Image (spheres, grey):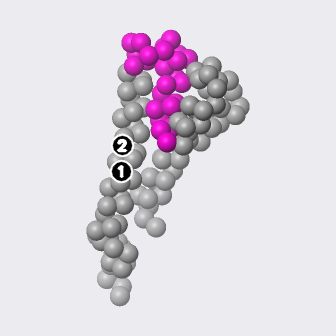
Amino acid sequence: MFPCCLVFGVLSASPRLIMLGLWLFTDYISRAYDGILWPLLGIIFLPCTAMAYAIAQNEFDGLRGWGVAIFAAGIVLDMAIYGTNRAHKARDRHWGSEHRHPGDSSAGSD
């Protein structure tokens, strides 16, 4: 496993873990959302956007002014996470599982 894949895995799981922790141990998420459907969908599909919405609701009185900027930043972060994941999958499809990736330290050990 490449170190960059480990870093990507930790970074992509972090927003979900933070949001889940806030939901379980504080009332921060419940103050921003009515019910459990939207935060649950947020944790699964768009964790940065869901967290940014909670921050906008709790700290900036909703999607006004800086709240919109925070929400937009969450959308951009989610797009970056999914875009990076898609690029990794495309690279793996291109190189195939039987070929080594460029930069692999064991490339000449066949």
Residue 84: assigned label: 1
Residue 35 is left or right of residue 70, and the answer is right
Q: Is residue 93 visible?
A: yes
Residue 39 is left or right of residue 107, and the answer is right
What distance separates the C-alpha of mark 2 from that of mark 1?
Answer: 6 Å
Residue 36 lies, in percent from the top left, at: 64, 31
Residue 38 is left or right of residue 24, and the answer is left
Residue 46 is left or right of residue 103, and the answer is right
The magenta stretch is 45-68
Please name the residue that numbered disc 2 is placed on: 80
Q: Are marks 2 and 1 in contact (CB under 8 Å)?
A: yes
Residue 17 lies, in percent from the top left, at: 59, 42
- The type of residue carrying mark 2 is Ala
User: Residue 33's quadrant in the figure?
Assistant: top right
Residue 3: assigned label: none
Residue 67 lies, in percent from the top left, at: 43, 17
